[in-house]
Amino acid sequence: MSHKIILTCAVTGSIHTPSMSPYLPVTPDEIATSAIEAAQAGASVLHLHARDPDTGRPSSDIDVFRQFLPRIKDATDAVINLTTGGSSQMTIEQRLSAPAELAPEMCSLNMGSINFGLFPMKDRFSDWKHDWEEPFLDNTRDTVFKNTFHDIETIFSMLGDADGARFEFECYDVGHIQTVAFYLRQNRIQAPVFLQFVMGVLGGIDASPQSLMYMKETADRLLGDSYQFSVLAAGRQQMSLGTMSVILGGNVRVGLEDSLMIKRGELAVSNAQQVTVIRSVLEKLGYEIATPDEARAMLALKGVDKVGF
């Protein structure tokens, strides 16, 4: 229990649609407010996407990002981690347009191309607020989230080499850990490597204790002491596998991007509520949450004074 825990909150994402929860942040004001509340509740890192303010559809518009990023930066000292994943239905040029100009301390980086199946979720709902939601979900039946080796290397160059960003390497399966290990051997990336085990997305590894152990064993074998890890468990396994991650020596991510629930049958009313619950569980087990500056030191980040917003 000697290590401090990096607690990431993923505030809105591109998976859930507005009809699924009235508490999902959509407008810039809602995203900023929800992110600030999550930081005040104890989140070390805020992982951020943008949405169209009128429809709630995932957006890559830099002007939308600019409406909430300065406000969050001014109100908190949390690490701001911008998505490079955007949405599986965006081009890579769209996904990179905002982070390339905004130069955040940290970015997410999906470590491979995968099927990204959201279509089963549409069967749980029938009353849609917007006409884009149901087709958006259904289209993932025939959509591949594309991040080739060339795409990954482009992101390294644009955001890492040019802007000094470090990465949250999102690993949806063990093959993605192999890709991280390859680039570490090539000296294309440097330790400390921060892995995010993404579990429970249809098309990737399932959210189970057995799969978490397999992911960790693979990372231990390939990366040795060069890495730290965190766990993102989609859906109902969010809190249990996040807790298991910490017990195994890792970190944890929660937030409405990954799960809309606080417990079975009950919607979370905010990102801060999920942060408060996992923080309470971990502190009762004797762990301590890292401050944003402690997280910066652990992840070797460039500092908030060097971002572009």
Image: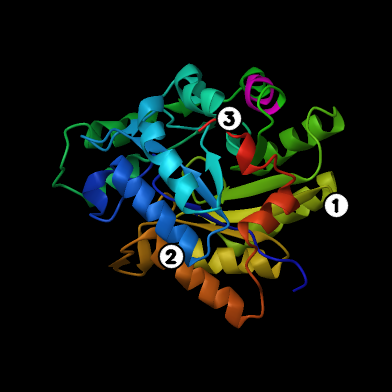
In 3D space, how far apart are the residues under numbered discs 2 and 1 (Cα atoms)? 30 Å
Density class for disc 1 (Cα within 10 Å; few <14, some 14-19, many ≥20) is: few
Residue 237 visible, this angle: no
Q: Look at the numbered discs 3 and 1 and tell me whether their residues touch, using CB distance below 8 Å.
A: no
Q: Between residue 281 and residue 99, name the one nearer to us.
A: 99
> Mark on residue 225?
1
Say which amino acid is labelled 3.
Ala
Q: Position of residue 247 (x, y in %)?
A: 68, 70
Q: The residue tagged with tag 2: helix, strand or loop?
A: helix
Q: Nearer the viewer, mark 3 or mark 2?
A: 3
Residue pointed to by mark 3: 103
Say which amino acid is labelled 1.
Asp
Q: Between residue 49 and residue 103, name the one nearer to us.
A: 103
Q: Quick check: is 150 in the magenta stretch?
A: no
In 3D space, how far apart are the residues under numbered discs 3 and 2 (Cα atoms)? 28 Å
Q: What residue lies at 61% left-to-right and 31% top-to-bottom?
A: 112
Q: What are the residue bounds of the magenta stretch?
A: 154-160
Compared with residue 247, is residue 258 higher up or lower down, i.e. above or below? above
Q: The residue tagged with tag 1: helix, strand or loop?
A: loop
Residue pointed to by mark 2: 274
In 3D space, how far apart are the residues under numbered discs 3 and 1 (Cα atoms)? 28 Å
Whichever of labels 3 and 2 marks the residue nearer the N terminus, that label is: 3
Say which amino acid is labelled 2.
Gln
Secondary structure predominantly adopted by residues drawn in magenta? helix
